[in-house]
Amino acid sequence: MTAERPILIRNARLLTMADGSDETSGDVLIADGMIQAVGGRIDHPDAEIIDAAGGILMPGFVDTHRHVWQTQ
């Protein structure tokens, strides 16, 4: 079984609940199904890169408001 490539989401507007954090722009690295890093500029040579410029990313939040007809 082959491990999935890490995913690196770049240039997102980050909204976190970390103490002292303000809204900022940065990157999120996801590997092995978990958030591994959140920060200003993250590099990972093997990661699939997603450019999220202009988007909002809230790492760790879960959207619990769903209707059955909205899921695929």
Image: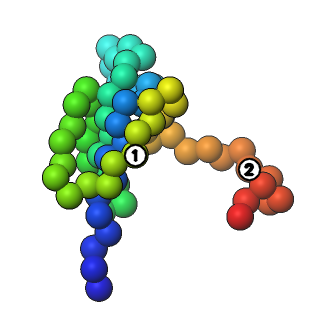
Q: Which corner quadrant holds the C terminus?
A: bottom right
Q: Amino acid at mark 1?
A: Ile
Q: Which mark is residue 50?
A: 1
Q: Choose mark 1 or mark 2, whichever is in front.
A: 1
Q: Which mark is residue 66?
A: 2
Counting from the top left corner in percent of width and height, residue 42 is at 21, 37
C-alpha distance separating marks 1 and 2: 25 Å
N-term mark: 1 or 2: 1
The residue located at (33%, 28%) in the rendering is: 26
Closest to the observer, 57 or 18: 57
Q: Which corner quadrant holds the N terminus?
A: bottom left
- Is residue 37 toward the left or the right of residue 66 in the image? left
Give the residue at the far bottom of this rendering: 1
Label 2's element?
A: loop
Counting from the top left corner in percent of width and height, residue 32 is at 30, 63
The residue located at (36%, 60%) in the rendering is: 33
Relative height, residue 11 to residue 3 (above, below): above
Relative height, residue 37 to residue 72 (above, below): above
Relative height, residue 68 to residue 23 (above, below): below
